[in-house]
């Protein structure tokens, strides 16, 4: 009597739940990931994965790299010269068929083996399982395994690991069999495995036949994180017209290309698709998995003048939180760029309508908190006193539209669009924001520029909807001013000449 196997019971339940969902199964199906995990557990159960050399029988081989070494025939801890085994290692060795012509199964195996985005045996195995679900060849793969005893019982001999059979002591080759017929490796343990146990393999194949009757509509190109997880990121396609500068700042982290900033008034910002924190996965069909530093820029240079198509992996998952496999990368990214922030929505349609389109220009919806005189002082140090002075008055904030133009700053009343004030850049002496309240910024202007010495100055304080928007406004104003800084109480924490604003990589 066959033993009860909890994994098969759980897999049966997963198949039934997936079938009850109705319609083609997609990547957003709530039961797909758990079904794939159960399937992987079944393929790994009883899989002999590690071997080592231990005191045992000698290998008589003139060309053996470890000639004279003692060899153990039993699994033990990982050791020098042996790789960890996974179910992909027997999948890639399934026979292609007697005719030699490609079959749907062999094509799926070939695609998984040549996938540039899957870097490990785990990733390739998972990619194959997705291909097999979509192509309805999963049951065929298991049936092929059952009909290939050498994969279930005997796999590699020592010589086959180095590409050829071992010679025996008398110089004759025996296919790697050591001293008269003992082989070194087996894939599945017949006692603990499911695939190596005939009584358990049969009900498993029956369940796979049920899966084969189901329809799957999966995004097979979304496979860059299968090395790490069965959870797949949200994947979108961004197409744009040829342009001189796209407006993305990139950072390379462990072979992945992150967008760290979308530059203001750039083509990418206008298109409202790319967000800071997203991963560039492909450019015009070319994978950026395991990219070297500068690879994306080099690819774009070759494609100059051509329409561009990007595959983007969102940092934000379906539930609104951060896509979990990205967390280690984002931690490194934050360490390299402390000012980096994840962007939740395009600036042009941010929360609370932070921007308005007027006459073809983007205006910021801000709150004007007030102004205070600074006397003859107009340097960056006056913001240290002026911003708290305005806040302490607790004056009613006024809703305004803020327009940063090429030569001046305009402030309009929001309801009537009446012009309240305009400040040409030569009248603005400095601009900065408050570190304690990251969405506040201020700038100093000449209050009486018509006077002979222009010695009277005012500080105007505004509140934006986010720190990111605040930074953007400061940067744009700063292009026409002398300097930009941030302050924290009386301590100046950063001073930066705008003409030397540097980033990792801009495209």
Image (spheres, rainbow, N blue to C red):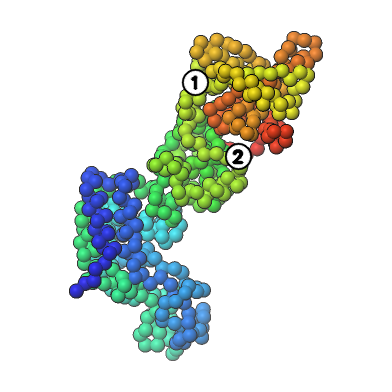
Residue 278 in the image: x percent, y percent? Answer: 48, 41
In the image, residue 217 above or below residue 113: above
Residue 140 in the image: x percent, y percent? Answer: 25, 61
Quadrant where the N terminus sits is bottom left
Task: Name the residue: 72% across, 22% down.
Answer: 429
Quadrant where the C terminus sits is top right
Task: Name the residue: 51% across, 10% down.
Answer: 416
Give the residue number, with chain letter if any, for mark 1: 356
Look at the numbered disc 2 and give the secondary structure of its residue.
loop
Task: Name the residue: 62% across, 13% down.
Answer: 421
As rendered, which of 152 and 167 lies closer to the eye? 152
Give the residue number, with chain letter if any, for mark 2: 339
Q: Farthest right residue? A: 453
Q: Which numbered marker is on residue 95?
A: none
Q: CA distance from mark 1 to mark 2?
A: 26 Å
Drawn side of residue 28 relative to residue 321, left or right = left
Quarter of the image where one finds residue 498? top right
Regarding residue 102, the answer to whether it shows in the image is no
Residue 125 in the image: x percent, y percent? Answer: 37, 59
In the image, residue 207 above or below residue 251: below
Residue 386 in the image: x percent, y percent? Answer: 69, 24
In the image, residue 246 above or below residue 325: above
Decide: few, some or many residues near mark 2? Use Cα within 10 Å; few <14, some 14-19, many ≥20.
few
As rendered, which of 255 and 335 lies closer to the eye? 335
Q: Which is more N-terminal, label 2 or label 1?
A: 2
As rendered, which of 211 and 231 lies closer to the eye? 231
Quarter of the image where one finds residue 497? top right
Regarding residue 432, the answer to whether it shows in the image is yes
Task: Name the residue: 60% across, 32% down.
Answer: 438
Look at the numbered disc 1 and give the secondary structure of its residue.
strand
Decide: few, some or many residues near mark 1? Use Cα within 10 Å; few <14, some 14-19, many ≥20.
some
């Amino acid at each position: 009597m066959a033993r009860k196997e909890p994994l098969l019971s759980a897999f049966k339940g997963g198949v039934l739940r997936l079938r009850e969902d109705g319609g083609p199964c997609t990547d957003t199906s709530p039961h797909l990931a758990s079904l794939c995990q159960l399937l992987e557990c079944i393929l790994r159960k009883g899989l002999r994965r590690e071997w080592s050399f231990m005191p045992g029988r000698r290998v008589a081989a003139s060309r053996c790299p470890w000639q004279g070494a003692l060899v153990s025939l039993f699994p033990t801890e990982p050791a020098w010269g042996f790789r960890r085994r996974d179910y992909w290692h027997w999948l890639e060795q399934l026979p292609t068929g007697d005719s030699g012509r490609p079959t749907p199964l062999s094509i799926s195996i070939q695609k998984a083996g040549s996938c540039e985005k899957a870097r490990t045996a785990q990733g390739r195995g998972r990619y194959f399982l997705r291909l097999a679900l979509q192509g309805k060849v999963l049951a065929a793969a298991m049936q092929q395994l059952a009909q290939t005893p050498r994969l279930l019982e005997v796999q590699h001999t020592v010589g086959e690991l180095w590409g050829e059979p071992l010679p025996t002591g008398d110089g004759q080759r025996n296919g790697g069999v050591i001293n008269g017929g003992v082989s070194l490796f087996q894939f599945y343990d017949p006692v603990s495995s499911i695939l190596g146990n005939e009584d358990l393999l049969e009900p498993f194949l029956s369940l796979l036949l049920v899966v084969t009757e189901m329809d799957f509509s999966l995004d097979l190109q979304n496979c860059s994180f299968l090395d790490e997880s069965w959870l797949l990121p949200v994947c979108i396609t961004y197409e744009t017209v040829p342009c001189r500068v796209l407006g993305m700042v990139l950072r390379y982290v462990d072979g992945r290309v992150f967008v760290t900033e979308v530059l203001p008034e750039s083509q990418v910002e206008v298109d409202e698709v790319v967000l800071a924190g997203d991963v560039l996965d492909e450019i015009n069909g070319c994978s950026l998995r395991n990219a070297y530093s500068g690879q994306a820029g080099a690819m774009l240079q070759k494609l100059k003048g051509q329409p561009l198509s990007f595959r983007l992996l969102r940092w934000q998952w379906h539930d609104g939180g951060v896509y979990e496999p990205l967390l280690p990368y984002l931690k490194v990214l934050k360490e390299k760029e402390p000012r980096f922030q994840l962007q939740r929505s395009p600036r042009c349609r941010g929360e609370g309508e932070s921007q308005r389109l007027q006459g073809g220009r983007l205006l910021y919806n801000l709150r004007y908190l007030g102004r205070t005189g600074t006397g003859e002082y107009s340097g960056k140090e006056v913001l240290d006193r002026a911003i708290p002075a305005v806040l302490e008055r607790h004056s009613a904030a006024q809703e305004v539209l803020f327009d940063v133009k090429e030569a001046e700053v305009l402030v309009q009343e929001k309801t009537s669009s009446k012009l309240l004030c305009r400040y040409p850049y030569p009248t603005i002496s400095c601009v900065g924001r408050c570190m304690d309240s990251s969405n506040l910024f201020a700038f100093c202007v000449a209050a009486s520029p018509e006077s002979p010495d222009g010695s009277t100055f005012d500080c105007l304080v505004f509140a934006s909807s986010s720190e990111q928007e605040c930074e953007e406004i400061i940067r744009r104003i700063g292009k026409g001013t002398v300097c930009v800084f941030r302050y924290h109480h009386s301590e100046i924490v950063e001073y930066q000449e705008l003409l030397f604003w540097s980033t990792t990589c801009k495209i």
